Image (cartoon, grey):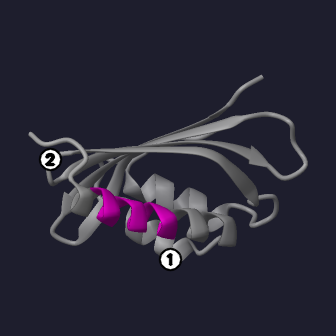
């Protein structure tokens, strides 16, 4: 297995940038697209545990678009072979001194790169 093949890193980085833009812009359609449509997908948020694509989609549909702006402080992307990657960021929400962290596991599916697992937390 080759780690961080340049073409794979570029592809994941492109999709990750789409995700970040969609998140702060509350583009729910793109966010829904970028999560793997499976009951096996999960997302642990800052205040919720979501099991399965349907729960994640429903959460996004009902979430307020207020307060989504954030500044990414650090990004770490690692790819493993051609079909798996992890992305990690540290971020700060506008108006907050607290550091947030986001981890995602991505896989390449027939439809393209999709998040299969995500975790968001905020440090005290």
Seen from the viewer's position, the closer of residues 55 and 103 is 103
Question: Residue pushed farthest right?
Answer: 95
The answer to whether residue 102 is magenta is: no
Residue 46 in the image: above or below residue 63: above
Residue assigned mark 1? 29
Q: Distance of mark 2 from mark 1, alpha carbons?
A: 28 Å
Coordinates of residue 6 in the picture (x, y in percent): 25, 57
Question: Residue pushed farthest front?
Answer: 6
Secondary structure beneath dot 2 equals loop
Does 41 sit left or right of 25 as displayed? left
Q: Residue at the spot x=69%, y=61% of the render? A: 63
Does 114 sit left or right of 109 as displayed? right
Question: Residue pushed farthest left?
Answer: 1
Q: Residue at the spot x=39%, y=56% of the render? A: 53
Residue 124 in the image: above or below residue 86: above
Seen from the viewer's position, the closer of residues 42 and 86 is 86
Q: Which residues are magenta?
A: 9-18
Q: Residue at the spot x=68%, y=37% of the render? A: 100
Q: Which mark is residue 81?
A: 2
Does 119 sit left or right of 40 as displayed? right
Q: Residues within 10 Å of mark 2 (few under 14, many from 20)?
A: few
Which marked residue is nearer to the observer: mark 2 or mark 1?
2
Q: Which mark is residue 14?
A: none
Coordinates of residue 21 in the picture (x, y in percent): 59, 69
The answer to whether residue 14 is magenta is: yes
Coordinates of residue 62 in the picture (x, y in percent): 66, 63
């Amino acid at each position: 297995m080759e780690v961080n093949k340049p073409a794979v890193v570029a592809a994941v980085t492109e999709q990750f940038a789409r995700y970040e833009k969609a998140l702060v812009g509350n583009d729910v359609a793109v966010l829904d697209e970028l999560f793997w449509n499976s009951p096996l997908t999960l997302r642990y948020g800052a205040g919720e545990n979501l099991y399965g694509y349907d729960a994640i989609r429903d959460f996004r549909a009902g979430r307020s678009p207020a307060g989504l702006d954030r500044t990414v402080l650090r990004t770490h992307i690692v790819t493993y072979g051609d079909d798996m990657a992890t992305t990690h960021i540290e971020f700060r929400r506008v108006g907050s001194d607290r550091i947030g962290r986001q981890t995602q596991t991505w896989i390449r599916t027939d439809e393209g790169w999709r998040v299969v697992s995500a975790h968001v937390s905020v440090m005290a």
